[in-house]
Amino acid sequence: MENNYLADLWNSSPIVCVVLTGLVLLLVESVRRGSGRLSYAVSLVGLASAGVLIVAVGDVAQPAFNNMIVQGPYAQFFTVIFLVTGILTILLSRGYLDRQGIHRSEYYLLVVFAISGMMLLAYAMDLIVVFLGIELMSICLYILAGFMRTRGTSMEAALKYFLLGAFATGFLLYGIALIYGSTGTTNLEQIAKSFAEHSASPMFLVGVSFLLVAFAFKVAAVPFHMWAPDVYEGAPTMVTAFMSTGVKAAGFAAFVAVFMRSFQYAGSPVNDVLAAIAAASMIIGNVTALAQVNLKRMLAYSSVAHAGYILVGLAAGNADGFMGILFYLVAYVVVNVGAFGILSLVEDSNGQKLSYDDYAGFSAQRPFLAALMSIFMFSLAGIPPFAGFFGKYYVFLAAVKADMIWLAVLGVLTSLVSVYYYLRLVILMYFREGSGDVAVRPTWAAMLSIGFAAYLVIQFGIFPSIVVDAALKVF
Amino acid sequence: MTLQAVLFYLLAAVSIASAIMVITRRNPVTSALFLVLNFFSLGGLYLTLHAQFIAVIQILVYAGAIMVLFLFVIMLLNLGDSQSLREVISLRKLAGVGLSTAFLLEIIYILGFRVSDFPAGEVTRGLEIGTVEYIGQKLFTDYLFPFEITSILLLAAIVGAVVMAKRKLD
Amino acid sequence: MDILIASTKIAVVLAAMLTSVVFLVLVERRMSAFIQNRIGPNRVGPYGLLQSVADVVKLLMKEDIVPAKANKPLHDLAPIISIAVAMTTFAVIPFGNAIELFGTTIKLQIADVNIGILYILAITSLGVYGLTLAGWSSNNKYSLLGGLRSSAQMISYELSMGLAIIGVILMAGTLRLDVIVEKQTEYLLGWLPAWNIFLQPVAFITFFIAAFAETNRLPFDLPEAEPELVGGFHTEYTGLKFGLFFLAEYMNMITASAIVVTLFLGGWHLPYADMLGLSGFALSILQVLTFCGKIVLVLLFFIAIRWTLPRFRYDQLMSLGWKVMLPLTLANALVTALILLAF
């Protein structure tokens, strides 16, 4: 079989472009030491050109490199999410890194490499690529979490994330090995084809459950969420933003690719397990978030809860669920980038000013930012007319259609719980007197990206059809 | 028993025994050395499967390079006081032990007693699959993409190590 | 029968190596004496030939001292690892062409494996355990520093060593050492033997330097640098165990020379020997002798270097390994691959 490497290269050109951006960044740093601003520009240009390429390549599904990856609407959809997240994160990061005194070009390099790892997960058609993508993404994030080397909490976050992440990787690899052992292939398409004859094999099932564990860890679903609060709190805020958006989306890109497109488990015990994980995540995430004082921790538990909502779509396992997951991810990602962006603006150089009380009276000092923050909180709580509402609507609808009404009801109930801790922030900002010593000096890039995120939240909330159409094309 | 079976059981016994020693020895250096022994017996097991390349790489990379660095670190940290590594048994740990034992038994039961459906076709491929030539051929054609990505992965890890280890924060 | 042949080969090679060590030590001492304008050992036996034998006897008679707080099992294990590694590396080196004896063709190589070079790299990479453990288990700061230095040094230079070999592997298209030697029996331009030293000069130089570092010989003998570390990793060793380290060092020298000869100097190939019109058996013997002769020359070079060059400083050693040797070997592998691709 003759491989047409040029065609393969063209099909994978967005990934290649991002990887090349990383290599250029490495060279930039080695030629001009401490050139943070140049790296900032290069990484933005690189990610933007990858965005151009992903449109240019088109949305016809085409396998490349011996069916290791597939370029197509699925990859395209997620890549756009990753690139937008990446660009927003980088725009917000520069001012933040300057304020924290850690503006070094390796930051951009690691973010760019992490994005290439995420893209691999969206492109993956083979479990080997899934593994490499998860590792590439995770290794960059372990480092990013500990990027503030002088701060103990940051190092703690890096170490915890690394140790537990390595453990999860072990599960992933063992699962892949067992699946390979029982099917003789690591290719997702071929596994899907021969699924019927292997689906009951115990070895295969153990492999599937190991993959489930690994993915659940990466998306921080209960009971594999223990790392999330500490890591989210300790990591530099913009890294946390990146983690809770890009990484979560990437984790679900792999989760969905493997579990919905390759393992056809709809209506089997696997879906019950998924439903149980979803239910546990929603309950524990939301209830624990109630008790938090630190906003980063609150958002960490909220991210566990949102993983639960997205898993509802996965547990439903039908076309609506698939569409719901995609919509939910888009809504969740833009909201979280915006919310963490505001947190990073308010945070002072000692890593303080992150608790609820620091936001008392925020609207009086920074009315515009307070308004945007309220939009994000409303969207997270799932209140119309913001994007978060439709996300929840679609996944709960999918659950109802899949005869999992209890899950939908549980979802609605836990959403009600979540309203309390999201709106508490809004109430503090608007109806409490503050001490008035919150010093916010946003860069124009940061304001622009937070504003853009808010714009998207409203846009997708009022006209969900933009995303819905794109998501339907993927299915 | 054929020679191969004898070798297999011998190496398997050594690898299991050394693995147990790794986690039961109180002296970290001794543990590390038993891990080396474990890698060795694994390498031997690969040899009985005609996977010479993997066998040698196992020894070269794991025993020869990675474990040396491990030892290096252990020695520099000077964990001489083995008392500090003594585990205190608590209820939580006991619960953990119970859970993992149950999990282990489950896996043993499933993999050991209910697996009879190994796909025979894949296993009996020729002896050439372990050779350097065959692996190289596969690596640079069918598995070209993962191979290249692995290089990026390692590059990212190196950058990360440098970021973490750099003495000066500039 | 096969087992008999194999054990004979092992016995012969080991005996040859052990005997060579005895004389190698003497040669080194005499040669260093010559370089330093001394006389050197000349009392025991004619021309001092039995000096090494006397040394061995002395070592055997000495008391075996283990420091009070040393880790006894590991203290014992370390020299054993060192000597075992030194003994097993030679297994894959072809010391002659196939020989016809009593109607059977015998390959003059103990183990003919298709991953020959990798085997050598794997085994030599284990040698570092001997030194590191010796350093650690002695419970002595000089020993520990020596052990740590040795592991850092050997790991650093192993990379250059492996990468230098890549050029040779690319030329030969195989990892089998016997095939690599066979490839070198051809002639370039009709007259120059196609030895890899001519085809891969950069690889030869880097490999040779790395071989010095791997055997811990001057100018790379920092693990036992006497002025700073007393005796380095073997400070706390006496008697037989010290003797084993000593033996291992010299055996490693012989093996390293043999590898250099095999990879770069045409192995057992004696140019134009096939024109002499010798019988097959005589030719084989001649080739084995050629192989030994080449090794002796390389060894003499080893010794001459030791007694003429000063020791590196540790940071110089590391920057040489990582900043000069490694890029050089990488570039060599790249250029070799490009040339092979172009033609």
Image: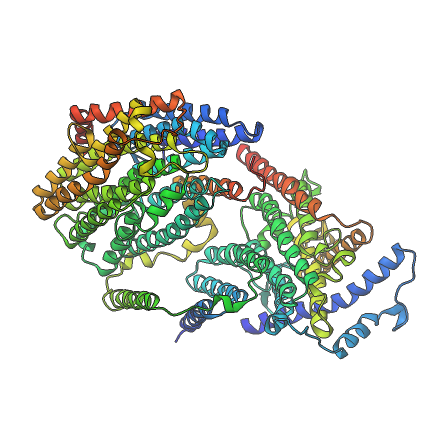
Q: Position of residue C205 (x, y in %)?
A: 69, 44
Quadrant the N terminus of chain B occupies: bottom left
Q: Is residue B61 above or below residue A332?
A: below
Residue closer to the observer: A128 or A92: A92
Q: Is residue C234 above or below residue A254?
A: below
Decide if residue A214 is on the left or right side of residue B1: left
Q: Is residue B45 above or below residue A85?
A: below
Decide if residue C266 is on the left or right side of residue C159: right
Q: How many marks?
A: 0
Q: Residue at x 58, y 52 (%)?
A: C179
Q: Position of residue A147 (x, y in %)?
A: 46, 40
Among the 4 quarters of the image, the one containing residue C48: bottom right
Q: Position of residue C307 (x, y in %)?
A: 82, 54
Q: Residue at x 39, y 48 (%)?
A: A161
Decide if residue A275 is on the left or right side of residue B60: left
Q: Position of residue A305 (x, y in %)?
A: 23, 44
Decide if residue C312 is on the left or right side of residue C9: right
Residue closer to the observer: A325 or C1: A325
Among the 4 quarters of the image, the one containing residue A51: top left
Is residue A9 in view?
no
Is residue A231 in view?
yes
Q: Residue at x 56, y 43 (%)?
A: C170
Quadrant the C terminus of chain B occupies: top right
Q: Coloring scheme of the render?
A: rainbow
Among the 4 quarters of the image, the one containing residue C126: bottom right
